Amino acid sequence: MKPDTYFIDGNTACAEGAIAAGCTFFASYPITPATEILETMAKRFPEIHGSYLQMEDELASIAAVIGASWAGRKAMTATSGPGFSLMMENYGFALMTETPCVIVNVMRGGPSTGLPTMVAQGDVMQTRWGTHGDVGVVVYCPGSPQEMFDMTVEAFNTAERYRLPVVLLSDAVVAHMTEKVVIPPKEELDIVNRKKPKNSPEEYLPYCPDEDLVPPMACAGEGYGVHVTGLTHDERGYPSVDEKTQTFLVTRLINKIRKNSDDILKYEEYKVDDAEIIIVAYGSVSRSAREAVDMARAEGIKVGLLRPITLWPFPEDRIYELAAKGVKAFLVAEINFGQIVYEVQRCTDGHCPTYLAPRMGGSIHTPEELVERLYGINEGKEGSN
Amino acid sequence: MRKELRFSGFGGQGVILMGHIFGKAAVFDGKNVTLTQSYGPEARGGACSVDIIVSDKDIHYPEVRKPDILISMSQPALKTYLPSLAEDGILFIDTSLVEYTVMENKGIPATELAEEVAGTRIVSNIIMLGYFTAATGLVTEESMKKAISKLVPKGTVEKNLEAFQVGFDKGKK
């Protein structure tokens, strides 16, 4: 789409964000509530000479995306919970082989096929620990159609910069909501492309990292020999299944994200400075929480909102700092039975209680029910979880 | 200014399109708009609605709960959504299809007018939008016309703008 102000839904904005970021390969299998991403890509890709593949399932979708990335394309797939579960094996493969790509998961109610058309936030820990082994991951959680555009661009940039599959974790409300979306001119968008090797094919070691722990990436057809394997591999990319290589490789994969987390981490604060109670909420629920902050403040309760935009890296230092500074309590609102709440609890390190406002899926919290909880916490009527 | 709106009718009347046209027009006017719609298996004939919040300020909680304005293009939609209307809310109905006299309302025979003007009832939604635009002044006439031109199928723009004008003129009275 031309740079302009549009009135589009979150899924359309996500597809446009991908195209703006330089995505030219998309392989997916339709699923509510992500289907509009496929529809938009199918319509738009002929115009940009992109490759659109509707695959037989989600296993094939992510496999095709990984292949395309190694052929030098910026590639994406989009799905919801049931498809995301199927992608877990190759999510790990992409992490192990440091394959830049973007996986969009528009969350709906689970487990299993659950609530196809309705919202939930039950896949949060799956993005972190859903694939086997120790991994460092990056997950963006947009809160509006505008952020669906912006964070998709950012997800591609992070994927290319740090060479990993990045998850855009949206939900049915944000994806299906229609709002004003500004698509900026090309020259105003920062677009990151993966590092290419500077040395000759004879000298090139495909998994030898630079100082930032990210190895330059040679792709198929560029004249370099590249071996891609999910087995523990040495700097040449050859399987080397021993403890020393494993320790070296996996430590680097995790530190690649950990040591660069200041660069990746994103969160937004609202009226946190003098807050005695802080709500932590992400995605669609953060919008209810934001309203609850104003409602509670009108009644004299000092409340603030901390909205993680990256769920991983998680704003751990900031939460610890706030807890240690004397915040009375945290209230975590999420559409699940408690996932991020345990992260917050961990980060407060016992300085203050953390409460959970759970919801089983189907709709988002109302501001009123959050205000009700805030009253209870403020008056000391709530026991800790 | 902050208003909650609910447009309702049956699938096939173009109720969702009404919401998108209004929302786009409000964006042209520089306002913030959040549109949500229910997703269900209903197609043509089933109950259908679209919810919109329009505001000069940022919109956070996206759901409409007590609409200030309700448009009902069918009797079942009226029955379903009337209880949600705010106490001092305004009700718009298509009097060709909806019979209602209990509370004060703004009625226009949109479906009959559509047949008269365009020879097809398909533009009844746009007639209602014209009427609604003139009666509420929530968005400008120019922005609505611009939004209609962008969102209706190619080749039908003129007919739709004509329908808009008919509704608009009735609403000004």
Image (cartoon, rainbow, N blue to C red):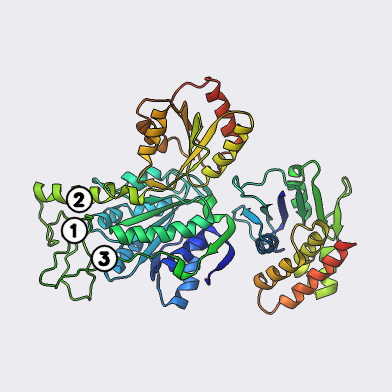
**Residue under the point 37% across and 61% down:** A156
Mark 2 or mark 3: name the one nearer the start of the chain: 3
> Residue A209 has which mark?
1
- Residue at 53% in and 38% down: A271
Q: Which residue lies furthest to the bottom in this view?
A: B155
Badge 2: residue crowd in 10 Å (few <14, some 14–19, many ≥20): some
Q: Is residue B33 left or right of residue B170?
A: left
Q: Is the same chain shared between marks 2 and 1? A: yes
Residue B26 to residue A85: above or below: below
Measured in 3D between alpha carbons, the distance from the residue under mark 2 to the one under mark 1, in whole angstroms, is: 9 Å
Left or right: B154, with A175 as reference point: right
Report the residue marked by disc 3.
Answer: A195
* Residue kind at label 3, given as amino acid type: Lys
Please report contact status of discs 2 and 1: CB closer than 8 Å, yes or no. yes
Near mark 1 (Cα within 10 A), the count class, few <14, some 14-19 or many ≥20, is some
| Left or right of A23 on screen, residue B21 | right
Q: Which amino acid does label 1 sit on?
A: Pro
Residue wearing tag 2? A252
Chain of the residue where label 1 is placed in the rendered structure = A
The C terminus of chain A - image quarter: top left
- Residue A27 to residue A329: above or below: below
Please tell me which of labels 2 and 1 falls first in the chain.
1
Task: Identify the residue at image location x=73%, y=66%.
Answer: B144
Mark toward the start of the polypeptide (1 vs 3): 3
Going by the image, does A329 lie left or right of A96?
right
- Residue situated in front as seen by the camera: A134 or A179: A179
Nearer to the camera, A232 or A163: A163
Marks 1 and 3, how far apart in space?
Answer: 11 Å
